[in-house]
Image (tube, rainbow, N blue to C red):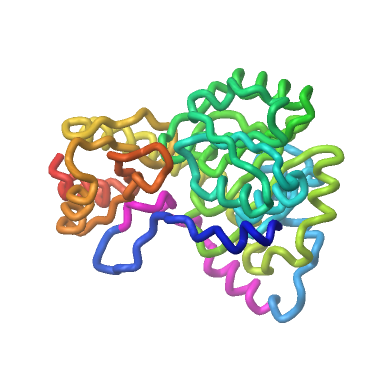
Amino acid sequence: MDSEAVESLGRVAHGGNTDPELLDFSANTNPRIPSGVAAVYEAALSAAKAYPADDYCEFRAAAADYVGVTGTEIVPAAGSLAGMRLLFSVVLGEGDSVAVPVPSFSEYAREVRLQGAEPRFVDHDAILDVDPAAHELVLVCNPNNPTGECYPTGDLLAFAEACHDAGTVLCVDEAFLDFTDRPTLAGTPGVVVARSLTKMFGLPGLRAGFLVATDALQERLETARPTWGMSTPAAAVGTHCLGATEFVADTRERVADERARMRSRLETRFDVSPSDAPFLLCRTTDPVGDVIEEGKEGGVVVRDATTFRGLDSHIRVAVKRPEQNDQLLDALGV
């Protein structure tokens, strides 16, 4: 990690609301969690008196089954962001160039800079058109946050092959991919996939996730990962959630139905971007601050999306339960 970057960089703004009187639409987490989580957590908590088994065999097996790879390709991490920091620390050096999409998850650029590397910002619509040979690493968020759309699978695979041929690492953040029926790039040579249990399973505070990598890069990540990097309760609950296939299917169907319904209502006031994710990006002609205050008066919090590089007149709203979504729509007057 670059010491000068540590001195100069600050924190990144995110969604999330601590006021219990307000319904939070600023963070894109599932309002439901799989059944049985509390019992699994309680059982694992008693086992936390000892160090976790550092091989994380059960978690690796569940994660591998979830994305369709072998357990040897899974690198456990305390959330996908911790996994990406591990990746960047392994492959990036001072002055290395990294293609970073905008607008997209704001932590990417910060994490790249913390390693002393240089983010090269590229419009998210054009990220698959960059020359891989010009960069040490390319980042893709699929589906992209905050815009919400997936990249065509064929285009992603062709770009992955170009990156592999150029010796460039392609990191694909698939934090929201399990809300879609699109195939993962997990297991593709030269690609490192980052996955999170935060979004689909509604457990952002658990801090559980994993990377998927192959060959020599997987071996380097496995060597460099922190010992006991995931707590015993996180690994146990993560293993349990990754087997909740019916829960995933039900969530995917609910989000698709509600997203379509919300978009048709929101479009009466906002310019709403197409989305494959559990959120909608809305461009407003009214001042963003006024829209946010209007939402609060109606008991909801929406995300100020002007904190994303390249956006200056947008809000983002999560897709929740039907009755919660009705409250949002009423609060925004649509």
The percent coordinates of residue 312 (x first, y second) are 31, 40
The percent coordinates of residue 229 (x first, y second) are 72, 64
Residue 271, compared with residue 43, is above or below; it is above
Quarter of the rendering containing residue 316? top left
Q: Nearer the viewer, residue 266 or 132?
A: 132
The percent coordinates of residue 293 (x first, y second) are 19, 55
**Do we see residue 330 in this rendering?**
yes
Quarter of the rendering containing residue 40? bottom right
86 left or right of 260 in image: right
Q: How many marks?
A: 0
Q: Quadrant of the C terminus?
A: top left
Residue 226, compared with residue 163, is above or below; it is below
Q: Nearer the viewer, residue 195 or 108?
A: 108
201 left or right of 54 in image: left
Q: Quadrant of the N terminus?
A: bottom right
Residue 184, compared with residue 14, is above or below; it is above
Residue 269 highlighted magenta (yes or no): no
**Do we see residue 63 in this rendering?**
no
Magenta residues span 24-46
- Residue lying at 40% horizontally and 37% vertically, measured from the top left: 310
Q: Nearer the viewer, residue 138 or 271?
A: 138
Q: Nearer the viewer, residue 35 or 237?
A: 237
The percent coordinates of residue 307 (x first, y second) are 38, 48
Residue 34 highlighted magenta (yes or no): yes
- Residue lying at 71% horizontally and 81% vertically, measured from the top left: 49
